[in-house]
Every structure is written in structure tokens, then in C-alpha cells.
Image (cartoon, rainbow, N blue to C red):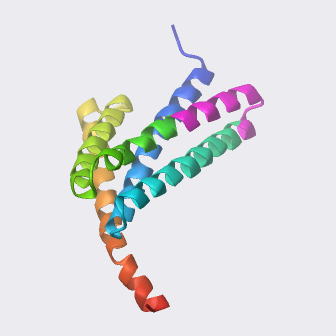
Amino acid sequence: MARSSNDKNVLRASILAVNDGLCSNFNFVMGVLGTGISDHAIVIAGIVGIISGAYSMASGEWLSLSTVNDKRIDAVKAALYSFCAFVIGASIPILPFMFLGAEDAIVNVTVICACAMFTIGVADGGKKTPLVSGAKHVAVGLAIAAVTHVCAMFIPDFLSFVIGG
């Protein structure tokens, strides 16, 4: 049985949102971790990232579909699925910080997120083989997280230099 275009929109929106939630909050958390702040502050920042990102993803999905589609119900459905999928993906990077210290969490969050990125890549393989797609998602996600983490390490010193203190 063929999927309707509405089902395809919802599936597309959900895969995009779970991947965006995972990658954006993983990179955000790795950046915040690079500044050397406490585990508690990392979890708070991660939760704020979940909230702001989920609403941004859902509103963007709704605005996009409602602009090109007269079926407002379908746009609302896709937006709700995007919201929920983003929350699921974005929750993954902060879970280790809720149960482990930052020293253990950095390795664990990286491994857990890499596994999740690989799974999403396999599911969203498109025309590529699943393993290639999964590996591509992991490579891109980890590279961006590493760059974000290293750049963020310089933020406290930069702010001290600019603001003084």
C-alpha cells in the first residue's frame, strides 16, 4: 500500500526533527561542556535547548507546510510530530549528564549520540547503502561537535579579555 503525501510529509518531518534535535543539542551540549561549567548548568542549558529547538522546529514545519498546502490540519500534524521527534532526539545528549559526572559523561554522550546518529542515518539512507548513510551521519555529527567543543573552550578567556575580569 502506497503512503499518502501527507504521511510522507509527517515521516520526513519526524526524521528531520529527531536528527536535528540530536545533532543540535549534542553540539550545543559539547560546546557548553567546553566552557568548563558545572554538570548542573549543562543539564539546564540542554533542557533550554530542547524547549527552544522543539518550538522552533515545529513552528518552522507548520509555517513551511501551511504556506504551500491549504490543508492546515496536515501542517499541524507534521508540526506536532516534529516537536515530539525533536524532543526525543535532543534529550539523548543530556541524559548521561543527569546520571554521570562530566568526566564520564563526555565519553558516554559521544558514544550514545554516535550510535543514535548512525541509526538515524541508516533509517534515512535514501539511495545510499544504509552503512554508508549511517557512517556519514556519524562523521558529520562528531566533526561538528569536536569543532564546537574546541571553539567553546576559548569563550571564557575571550570574554575575560573583552569584558575584563
Q: Position of residue 78 (x, y in %)?
A: 62, 31
Q: Position of residue 31 (x, y in %)?
A: 37, 63
In-front residue for pair 129/62: 62
Q: Position of residue 148 (x, y in %)?
A: 35, 64
- Give the farthest residue toward the top: 1
In-front residue for pair 25/99: 99
Q: Main secondary structure of the magenta part?
A: helix
Say if residue 146 shows up in the picture.
yes
Say if residue 136 shows up in the picture.
no
Left of 141 or right of it: where is 11?
right
Q: Position of residue 30 (x, y in %)?
A: 34, 59
Residue located at (58% from left, 51% from top): 52
Residue located at (69% from left, 26% from top): 74
Q: In the rendered image of this protein, does residue 128 appear above or below residue 34?
A: above
User: Which part of the image, by quadrant, shows the C terminus?
Assistant: bottom left
How many marks the image carries: the answer is: 0
Q: Quadrant of residue 126?
A: top left
Q: Quadrant of residue 137?
A: top left
Which stretch is magenta?
A: 66-84
In-front residue for pair 70/151: 151
Q: Does the stretch in magenta take in 122?
A: no
Q: Does the stretch in magenta take in 74?
A: yes
